[in-house]
Amino acid sequence: MATMNKKTKAKVVKSKEKEKKKTTTHDDGTNKGDNNNNVFASCSFSSLGLHQTLCDQLRERMGFEAPTLIQAQAIPVVLSGRHALVNAATGTGKTIAYLAPIIHHLQSYDKRVQRSDGTFALVLVPTRELCLQVHEILQKLLHRFHWIVPGYIMGGESRSKEKARLRKGISILIATPGRLLDHLKNTSSFVYTNLRWIIFDEADRILELGFGKEIQEILNLLGSMKTGHDDQESGVPRPSKFQRQNLLLSATLNEKVNHLAKISLEDPVMIGIDDKIMEPTSRIRFDNSDCDEDNEDTHSSKIPAIGAYKVPEQLIQRYMKVPCGSRLAILLSILKHLFEREPSQKVVLFFSTCDAVDFHYSLITEFLFSSYPQTEEGNRTMFLGCKTLRLHGNMEQEDRTTSFQAFKTEKSALLLSTDVSARGLDFPNVRCIIQYDSPGEATEYVHRVGRTARLGERGESLLFLQPSEIDYLQDLEKHGVSLVEYPLLKVLDSFPLSAHKNNIKKSVFIDMHPWIMCLQKALESCISSKPKMEELAKRAFCSWVRAYTAHRGELKRIFMVKKLHLGHVAKSFGLKQIPSLVGKSFQNQTKKRKRFEKKNGPSNKRKVARRVT
Ligand SMILES: Nc1ncnc2c1ncn2[C@@H]1O[C@H](COP(=O)(O)OP(=O)(O)OP(=O)(O)O)[C@@H](O)[C@H]1O
């Protein structure tokens, strides 16, 4: 560089700028980044061994010209019949990586598969929305193979209708674990004697949600069944070496999956797993209980240990240090800034509890504002003009599905959600992820931010941290995730404060910033004037504090409830006073926990809190 003349230097700068532009601006209005080389393989689907009709379907109906890198690695392995553990960043196309080879095999049977043959492939997923999503992709893939029947069963749906569908026969079944177990035990017409594939999509999450016991039972029920099926008679060929083929997939495979891998995978192929992070199977069990030292497992297979998680390279990850009492005003300011900067975009906002989603949803959709304090109610305008949706586990199933589908198709919207949206959901063109309540485990951070920057698209994420929580950044760093600070003051300074034009003093303290003070006042008066909203705020406050106390392990040191100033927490819900923590919502939560424990045995707080997300 030292010997570079001025002209050459200018050229380098120009080409660097061009490079930068390539990943940010797009003529067609989409937000695809041009880092295709990091995402797509330089081969075709047919070169991987997939049937031509399926390749045509992938290209013509789904618009997939070439396989992604993980598909190019995984498809030949799945086609070969080997068990596999697949680890790849979020949004890299893992769903097709397992569905396409299954369809390839099923369509090739000499005697066409029939509904009366029952289920050949079972895909287990942690959430209902993911169940619907995988089913939708499957339907598209099967468009030219009408004799292979897709179907799903999941909590919240009518059991009797599901029974009828199972009786008719479903060739590829997508299921949530609880409902699957229910049908395995109680639906005698459910035929699974031909079952050849079991896939655990988001395997680690299925276990984290406390489904370990169910999974064990499911595997027992499926594994101990007698096929009693004569292959020649049925015309259904069986893989010669591997009767069953099981696959585990996630962007964050970690020790929690060890036990599942050990009992369900036979000599698995590791895909996307770095040798450096391999270690012999450890002794962690499904239920997270301590293992008996005497029964130490000596199984020799190797599976991934804790290591760096893969986050999309083009994702811009930021954090913001926010004083507790100003959290709400800052959140709304950031949202306003984002939607004013780019009115047509999609943003997902994560909270730790269902109550927090409900309160913020009600506030965002009703809050009127003017920066002139004396303005009459009628002359105020909506603070945020964007379309707002919500999604969490306490909503009626119908409303959940409506929100989920609406956010998929909307061009511009804000989705308020719990971690129910964190895993696997593929909302097109999400530009920004905001984690208002921190996610806890680093795995959840990775999956939440993974709802943007999918398949090479650009995307950004923003994590809210209170000053006392800043060590969380080190925890993320341990997993190879690093964040840069968001220029908060600069954004706050950009808001016009007409009423205070002449006497604005710039403040370096965020909570003393005139814009924040003015907004906080307006928020508090809006909330106190609407009894329903105030009730939601109180409820959200209580469940937020409870969720905060439920952090586990190392994170307890960072998220310490003792360090919280409850008055400031109340302020962050727009409340002028601290509500009683022993209210109605606490009683409801206790009842819910008791019901859960009665059904599933004693469980720790975090598990229960997280299961209803
Ligand atoms: N070969 C391909 N070409 C173009 N698009 C693809 C291809 N394969 C998958 N996609 C699209 O990429 C997106 C991400 O795929 P998918 O949801 O399967 O990712 P994932 O790796 O399972 O993500 P997550 O870890 O978040 O669950 C989807 O919109 C899917 O339709």
Image (spheres, rainbow, N blue to C red):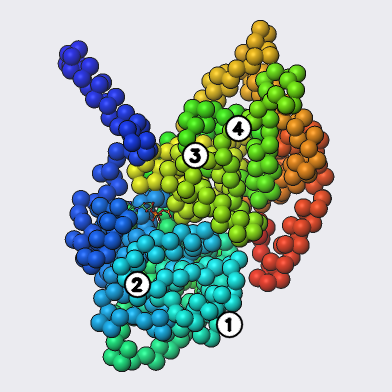
Can you give x and y, in whole percent of width and height, for residue 416 in the image?
59, 44
Report the residue marked by disc 3. Answer: 412
Q: Position of residue 439 (x, y in %)?
A: 56, 46
Question: Can you give x and y, in whole percent of width and height, for residue 453 in the image?
Answer: 40, 42
Q: Mark 4 points at which residue?
A: 384
Q: Can residue 477 be seen in this view?
A: no
Q: Can residue 370 be seen in this view?
A: yes
Residue pointed to by mark 2: 146
Placement of 567 over or under 354, stated as above or below: above
Q: Give the Cα separation between the discs numbered 3 and 4.
A: 13 Å
Q: Mark 1 points at which residue?
A: 186
Tell me which amino acid carries mark 4.
Leu
Q: Is mark 4 on a helix, strand or loop?
A: loop
Gap between marks 4 and 2 measured at Cα: 46 Å
Splitting the image into 4 quarters, where does residue 563 fall? top right
* Mark 1 surroundings: few (<14), some (14-19) or many (≥20) residues within 10 A: few
Q: What element carries label 1?
A: helix
* Earlier sequence position, callout 3 versus callout 4: 4
First in sequence: mark 3 or mark 1? 1
Q: What residue type is labelled 2?
A: His
Q: Are marks 3 and 1 in contact (CB under 8 Å)?
A: no
Q: Which of marks 4 and 2 is in front?
A: 2
- Check disc 4: other Cα within 10 Å, few if <14, some if 14-19, many if 20+: many
Judge from the rendering whether residue 542 lies leftward or rightward of residue 108; answer left or right. right
Label 1 or label 2, whichever lies nearer to me, is: 2
Lateral position of residue 428 relative to residue 578, left or right: left
Q: Which amino acid does label 1 sit on?
A: Asn
Comparing labels 3 and 1, the label whose residue is closer to the camera: 3
Label placed on residue 510: none
